[in-house]
Amino acid sequence: EESRGARGGLRSAFLISTLPFQRASALKSRISWKGKLPGFSSSVVVLSKKKSVTTKSNAKVSPSLSPAFTDSNGFGKGPAGGKGEKILMWFRADLRLHDHPALKYVEEHASAVLPLFTFDPRQFGKTSFGFAKTGRYRAEFLIEAVDQLRKRLRDIGSDLIIREGKPEEVIVNLCKQNGIRKVVYHREVCFEEQEVEQKLHKALETGRIEHKAMWSNTLYDVEDLPFAVEKMPDVYSKFRDMVQEKGQIREALPAPKKLPRTIDCESGRLPTLSDLGLGSEPARNLKTERFTGGEIDAMGRLEKYIAEAKRNSGTASSHLGAD
């Protein structure tokens, strides 16, 4: 995203950082409102989770800041399907059950599933300038979100396997240990996340394991736009006007009530801040509102924001508050 205006850009980034686990489309069945959200002035990157381009998993492609319209699958084959596959479901920044295309794929195609989240040590180190890549409060937020996802999966008879380590190593090892031949996940946008994907693709190809990368990070799917991608407006306000008038937002996918059998595997322990090298539990005497990680809190927070935006749109008060 390319923000216009420091205040709007910061507000957009802040809301996204506190709600990383739920697509905006998840509320469209309950909130019928069109209009510019106060404080938002970001251009929108629109990608598709349906249109697919099959690629070899060992393709020499450098990570880019804009994801491709791809549905990756190892060995140059089209998307494999059919009930009976053992699938590893790799959760990343999509720590939710509701409106989750990759999880829907698992629900429809797998005979058994291993849901996995990995705490990548590279995300808890230092930058080249010596600053922590992940602070204590953000790490605590992530731990809470992972913990809530595990509880929600257990509520429907499944589980979440938790590991600390590099995904390209952890995933391949778990696949080999459990006879899994396919990995499903959502593609991410940023450079480092795409670097991890490239490393994973190479490791999976070496082990002759397929992968399916899906997309779920934008409100509009590319084929639902009222114009061809090559005619995408350069100015956000024009894009917004066009999609508000003629664009279509797809219905959110419901959370699964049951998943295929969970592959028998050691669940793993949820790490603490100390385990991640971030010291003990942070103090609670924050002067600002404290946000709790997890899908349930994210949904409530988004509903509250939309309700306030509807009441205060276009007024000075719409620029106040935590968002």
Image (spheres, rainbow, N blue to C red):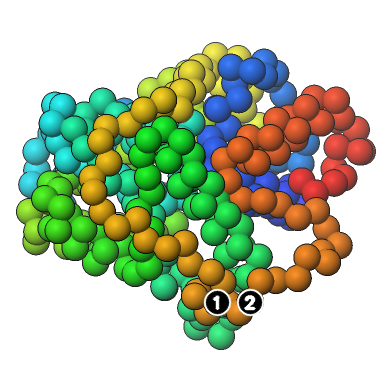
Which residue is at 26% across, 54% downward?
265
Residue occupying the far bottom of the picture = 130
Q: Sort mark 2 into few (<14), some (14-19) or many (20+) by Cα contacts within 10 Å.
A: few
Q: Nearer the viewer, residue 146 or 121?
A: 146
- Residue at image mark 2: 280
Secondary structure found at label 1: loop
Q: Does 156 sit left or right of 315 as displayed?
A: left
Closer to the chain start, of discs 1 and 2, is 1
Q: Is residue 174 above or below residue 232?
A: below
Residue 133 in the image, given as x and y percentages of width and height: 54, 73
For the view shown, which residue lies furthest in the right direction? 316
- In this view, the residue in front, 148 or 299, is 148
The kind of residue tagged 1 is Ser
Is 202 situated above or below 113? below
Snapshot quadrant of residue 28 = top right
Q: Residue at x 19, y 63 (%)?
A: 173
> Label 2's element?
loop
Distance from label 1 to label 2 (Cα)? Answer: 6 Å
Q: Callout 1: 10 Å neighbours few (<14), some, many (20+)? A: few
Q: Residue at x 9, y 43 (%)?
A: 76
Residue position marked by numbered label 1 in the rendering = 274
Q: Are marks 1 and 2 in contact (CB under 8 Å)?
A: yes
Q: Is residue 273 visible?
A: yes
Residue 65 visible (yes or no): no
Number of dots carrying numbers: 2
Residue at x-position 41% and y-position 73%: 121
Q: Is residue 318 left or right of residue 77?
A: right
User: What percent of the width, then of the height, locates residue 200?
Assistant: 24, 60
Q: For residue 117, what is the image quadrant?
A: bottom left
Asked whether, in this view, residue 309 is left or right of residue 81, the answer is: right
Q: Left or right? Give the position of 302 relative to 86.
A: right
Residue type at mark 2: give it: Ser
